[in-house]
């Protein structure tokens, strides 16, 4: 497995690989890898001749400097995991390599970014589209793989490739959960044992929404009231948002009569966690 640290090295490697007619699957990450990331790597393996994983904690998408400082980092273990999964190259740049002229935003995120996480993390998605666009230019993959765990991010990246005419296929992959339902996240490492238990209320609210919709409740007002009853019943949680929106446009809806996204974000102690599910899939 190659470890590539500069944009030039990565571009050269990619051009050689693509020039030989091989397809390239790309999994961008911020490291502290877990089974969620590994599921993307396995999907990329299955759909590509070669796989590149990037590990970069992107400063421009953190609006809270304390959160950036405390973000888990575990590069040696990440490298071993990538090696064991048969990854061909890991792109491991420094912040100076990615932002040689200082941390500036190149691209503004679209209106899709104004709700949900974008509403409470101002500037976050501008940082995401900036770094993803840079990574795409450097890695030049055939396909890039993103988790539905960050559902709004995936929607915005689908917009990005359309808007900027980027010739990369975007592949979304389902959320990987712990046995007890907690959505896997690098941030889970920061939870105490007590907070880890409290965090389960997010996935409990997801399950509740799925059960209620399957049982015929489609009224968004009623569903959200029940979701909030579940969420507020748990001590130690500070709810950021719990919403149901159109799964494609992310606009608010009153009835779950089309593919709809239930998305929740909450602080568990000092750690902000997110979870979601699509309530009706496919039109
Ligand atoms: P991150 O390192 O948190 O930036 O995540 C890198 C990629 O892994 C993103 O596309 C995430 O959506 C995806 N991802 C993170 N957690 C999960 C999970 N539990 N299941 C599936 N994909 C995930």
Image (tube, rainbow, N blue to C red):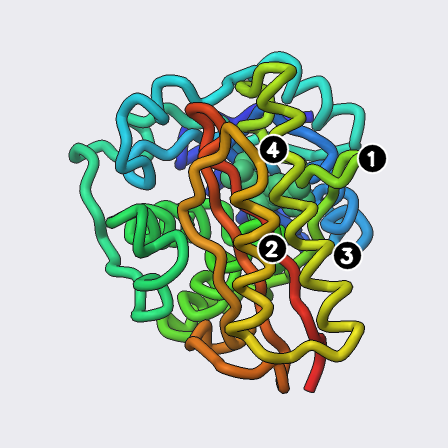
Q: Nearer the viewer, residue 85 or 48?
A: 85
- Kindly identify which numbered label has been placed on residue 199: 4
Tell me the residue at 53%/48% (across/down): 15
Q: Is residue 137 above or below residue 186?
A: below
| Label 3 – label 1 distance at C-alpha | 27 Å
Choose top left, top right, bottom left or bottom right for residue 119: bottom left
Secondary structure category for the residue under label 4: loop
Q: Specify the label residue 179 is tagged with.
A: 1
Name the spot of residue 52 as percent of width and height, x first.
62, 40
- Disc 3 packing (10 Å; few <14; some 14–19; many ≥20): some
Q: Position of residue 61 (x, y in %)?
A: 33, 41
Q: Is mark 1 within 8 Å of ligand 1?
A: no
In space, the residues marked 1 and 2 are separated at their CA atoms by: 17 Å
Point out which mark residue 47 bears.
3
Q: Quadrant of ligand 1?
A: top right
Please name the residue shown 51% across and 38% down the image: 273
Horizontally, residue 135 falls left or right of residue 224, namely left
């Amino acid at each position: 497995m190659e470890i590539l640290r500069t944009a030039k090295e990565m571009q050269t490697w990619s051009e050689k690989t693509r020039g030989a007619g091989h397809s390239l699957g790309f999994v961008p990450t911020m490291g502290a890898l877990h089974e969620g990331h590994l599921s993307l790597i396995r999907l990329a393996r299955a759909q590509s001749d070669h796989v590149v994983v990037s590990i970069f904690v992107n400063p421009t998408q953190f609006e809270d400097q304390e959160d950036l400082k405390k973000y888990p980092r575990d590069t040696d273990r990440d490298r071993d995991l990538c090696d064991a999964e048969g990854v061909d190259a890991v792109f491991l740049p420094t912040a100076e390599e990615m932002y040689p002229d200082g941390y500036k935003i190149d691209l503004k995120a679209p209106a899709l970014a104004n709700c949900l996480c974008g509403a409470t993390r101002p500037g976050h998605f501008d940082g995401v589209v900036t770094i993803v666009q840079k990574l795409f230019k450097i890695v030049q993959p055939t396909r890039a793989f993103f988790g539905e765990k960050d559902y709004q991010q995936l929607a915005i990246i689908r917009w990005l490739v359309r808007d900027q005419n980027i010739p990369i296929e975007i592949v979304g992959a389902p959320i990987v959960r712990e046995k007890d339902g907690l959505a896997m996240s690098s941030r889970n490492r920061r939870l105490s044992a007590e907070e880890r238990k409290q965090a389960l209320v997010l996935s409990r609210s997801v399950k509740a929404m799925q059960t209620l919709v399957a049982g015929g409740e489609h009224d968004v007002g009623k569903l959200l009231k029940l979701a909030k009853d579940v969420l507020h019943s748990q001590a130690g949680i500070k709810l950021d948002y719990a919403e149901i929106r159109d799964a494609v446009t992310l606009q608010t809806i009153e009835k779950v009569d089309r593919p709809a996204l239930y998305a929740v974000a909450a602080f568990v102690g000092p750690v902000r966690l997110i979870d979601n599910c699509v309530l009706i899939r496919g039109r």
